[in-house]
């Protein structure tokens, strides 16, 4: 069986984890957490990066830093993971879902402005599959309406928009290092902070509402409780596992891109014949090969394709159930405008295996089986 996903692993990881144990430094903000933060800051150019226990928690921190309050509205796509909405629902805000673009599966930037009300406080673009949203337009809308932009870049590390790293364009950016992501620490994430003015408050929120970070830097002689907060620090052992991958991040990225290109070339004839659709990467967007998906004609064909691949030893899966159709989405949020594409396109999409370590011959076999599926009955 070809697995859908295999968590990434770098050879130095176990040695780094053993070092944490040997030095009796396994809690948060140890040496490897700092190394990861510094690496991400240098790679992305963000003013500050803070490793977190998850992308969910990074988004919760962004909501706190944005001072989201009960009654506020936050614009986002419904085609996303529940955490995108949860972070704001926890603050008492209402997620306002708008339709997606059928080409990238991203938030349709042309529909945002019509969804803005006097209660709107933030826009949350989700960079699906590591392909950037149209950020110039989104940032322009945000500036004109005085809105915060929080990038859900859970899938976007090593991707960029017009030369800018995803997660660094808006006020805040959120990465995921879940085991299904390009780089993993099992569970984990990171908050990227664009403006230096927000760093101190972010450190306080992340450290349970204390000014402990300033204490450890020697800026104060004791630390105390100064604001609300929680514990968003991952274990340094998790950070050590991640850091081993970051050291070979370019190697991992290039390997994934090579597999992505092989999928595309292997399935191009089906696309040209109009039998399925392949991912679209707009001009100016550099993606990270987070996933490779195909779009069948409809949900029935997709179901049959996934079943056929499974019969042939290939694990393929569909993705998000649109949030506005879920019980909690109907309870806490609302959909603005017409759902022209969100539901329809989500029901067509099937994800193919993609991970660091997947072999080229396995990709070729998968492409062969997809072509075989579409050649039946001819």
Image (cartoon, helix red, strand yellow):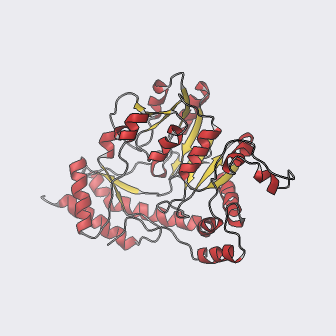
Of residues 27 and 117, the one drawn nearer to the viewer in this rendering: 27
Q: In the displayed image of the protein, which residue is found farthest to the top?
A: 118
Residue 175 in sight: yes
Residue 198 lies, in percent from the top left, at 71, 41
From the viewer's perspective, tell me whether residue 368 is left or right of residue 142: left
From the viewer's perspective, tell me whether residue 279 is left or right of residue 275: right
Residue sitting at x 56%, y 68%:
251
From the viewer's perspective, tell me whether residue 363 is left or right of residue 52: left
Residue sitting at x 58%, y 32%:
69
Residue 188 lies, in percent from the top left, at 56, 58
From the viewer's perspective, tell me whether residue 291 is left or right of residue 2: right
Of residues 115 and 292, the one drawn nearer to the viewer in this rendering: 115
Residue 20 placement: quadrant: bottom right
Residue 183 placement: quadrant: bottom right
Q: In the displayed image of the protein, which residue is found farthest to the left?
A: 377
Q: Quadrant of the C terminus?
A: bottom left
Residue 262 lies, in percent from the top left, at 39, 64
Residue 260 lies, in percent from the top left, at 42, 61
Q: Quadrant of the N terminus?
A: bottom left
Q: Is residue 85 above or below residue 378?
A: above
Q: Is residue 376 above or below residue 146?
A: below
Residue 169 in sight: no
Q: Is residue 22 above or below residue 281?
A: below
Residue sitting at x 43%, y 45%:
80
């Amino acid at each position: 069986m070809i697995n859908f996903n295999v968590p990434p692993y770098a050879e130095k990881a176990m040695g780094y984890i053993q070092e944490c144990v040997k030095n009796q430094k396994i809690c948060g903000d140890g040496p490897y957490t700092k190394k990861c933060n510094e690496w991400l800051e240098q790679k992305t150019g963000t003013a500050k990066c803070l490793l977190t226990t998850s992308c969910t928690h990074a988004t919760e921190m962004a909501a706190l830093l944005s001072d989201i309050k009960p009654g506020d509205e936050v614009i986002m796509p419904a085609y996303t993971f529940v955490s995108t909405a949860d972070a704001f629902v926890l603050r008492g805000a209402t997620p306002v879902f708008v339709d997606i673009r059928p080409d990238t599966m991203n938030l349709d930037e042309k529909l945002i402005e019509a969804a803005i009300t006097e209660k709107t406080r933030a826009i949350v673009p989700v960079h699906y599959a590591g392909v950037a949203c149209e950020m110039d337009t989104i940032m322009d809308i945000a500036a004109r309406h005085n809105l915060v932009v929080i990038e859900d870049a859970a899938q976007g590390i090593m991707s960029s928009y017009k030369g800018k790293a995803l997660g660094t364009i808006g006020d805040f950016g959120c990465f995921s290092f879940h085991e299904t992501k390009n780089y993993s620490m099992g569970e984990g994430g990171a908050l990227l902070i664009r403006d230096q003015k927000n760093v101190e408050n972010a450190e306080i929120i992340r450290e349970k509402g204390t000014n402990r970070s300033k204490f450890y830097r020697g800026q104060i002689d004791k630390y105390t409780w100064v604001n609300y907060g929680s514990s968003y620090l991952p274990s340094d052992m998790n950070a050590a596992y991640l850091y081993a991958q970051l050291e070979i991040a370019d190697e991992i990225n290039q390997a994934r891109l090579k597999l992505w290109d092989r999928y595309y070339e292997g399935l191009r004839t089906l696309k040209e014949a109009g039998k399925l659709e392949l991912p679209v990467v707009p001009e100016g967007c550099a993606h990270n090969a987070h996933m490779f998906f195909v779009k069948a004609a409809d949900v029935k064909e997709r179901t049959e394709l996934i079943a056929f691949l499974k019969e042939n030893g290939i694990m393929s899966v569909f993705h998000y159930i649109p949030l506005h159709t879920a019980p909690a989405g109907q309870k806490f949020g609302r959909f603005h405008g017409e759902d022209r594409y969100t539901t329809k396109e989500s029901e067509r999409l099937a994800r193919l295996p993609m991970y660091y370590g997947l072999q080229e011959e396995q990709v070729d076999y998968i492409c062969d089986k997809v072509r075989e599926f579409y050649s039946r009955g001819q």
